[in-house]
Image (cartoon, grey):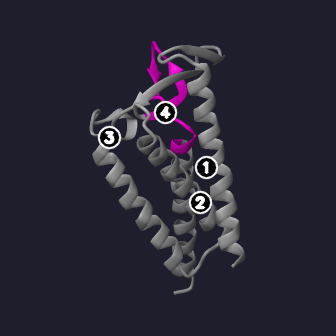
């Protein structure tokens, strides 16, 4: 039960962080405006992603909404049915869940698209596509989950 409470708290806190940062950006930054944070390497901007990951398939917002909801349901089911729930596993799943919910909320609350605002890179070399806290949570959760699974696999190999 402790790990379910832990996961719920982590999900709530990180989802709140995503929602608040998006709200502040929408209220304070004009669309396409760039604000330098660390020179021009790290900027804040307001962009609406009407497509999928990294802006692919723009205009298919309904498709990505349905896909996101299906994936969210699968993630929650996987979390519930997983027997070995380490705190790292719970953290990873909480990050992924919060990120998915954060981007789903953008799609269902009448915004033009998913609010992206973190912009990293150099315009003359390479600039990573704009992203948000939810995107960062999904990526961080996936990395943590990968590490958890690799450690479990290594333990299984050692025990053979």
Residue 128, given in percent of the width and then of the height, sits at 46, 28
- Residue at figure coordinates x 44%, y 60% from the top left: 72
Local crowd size for mark 3, using a 10 Å CA cut-off: few (<14), some (14–19), many (≥20): some
Measure the alpha-carbon separation of dots 4 and 2: 20 Å
Residue 64, given in percent of the width and then of the height, sits at 33, 47
Measure the alpha-carbon separation of dots 2 and 1: 9 Å
Q: Which residue is mark 1?
A: 15
Residue 136, given in percent of the width and then of the height, sits at 55, 43
Query: Residue lying furthest front in this view?
Result: 110
Q: Find the magenta span and give its range.
A: 114-135
Mark nearer the N terminus (4 vs 1): 1
Q: Which residue is mark 2?
A: 94
Residue 54, quarter of picture: top left
Q: Which numbered marker is on residue 115?
A: 4
Mark nearer the N terminus (3 vs 1): 1
- How many numbered dots are placed on residues in this image? 4
Q: Which residue is mark 3?
A: 61
Query: Residue lying furthest bottom in this view?
Result: 160
Q: Nearer the viewer, residue 137 or 1?
A: 1
- Is 28 left, or right, of 81 in this rendering? right
Report helix, strand or loop for mark 2.
helix
Residue 71, given in percent of the width and then of the height, sits at 39, 60
Residue 25, quarter of picture: top right
Measure the alpha-carbon separation of dots 4 and 1: 14 Å
């Amino acid at each position: 039960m402790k790990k379910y409470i832990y996961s719920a708290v982590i999900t709530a806190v990180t989802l709140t962080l995503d929602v608040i940062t998006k709200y502040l950006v929408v209220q304070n930054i004009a669309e396409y405006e760039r604000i330098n944070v660390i020179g021009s390497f790290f900027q804040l901007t307001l962009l609406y992603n009407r497509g999928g990951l990294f802006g692919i398939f723009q205009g298919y917002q309904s498709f990505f909404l349905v896909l996101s909801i299906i994936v969210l349901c699968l993630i929650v089911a996987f979390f519930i049915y997983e027997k070995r729930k380490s705190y790292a596993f719970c953290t990873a799943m909480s990050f992924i869940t919060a990120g998915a919910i954060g981007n789903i909320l953008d799609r269902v609350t009448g915004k033009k698209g998913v609010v992206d605002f973190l912009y990293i890179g150099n315009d003359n070399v390479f600039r990573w596509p704009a992203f948000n806290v939810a995107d960062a949570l999904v990526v961080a959760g996936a990395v943590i989950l990968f590490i958890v699974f690799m450690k479990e696999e290594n333990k299984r190999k050692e025990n053979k």
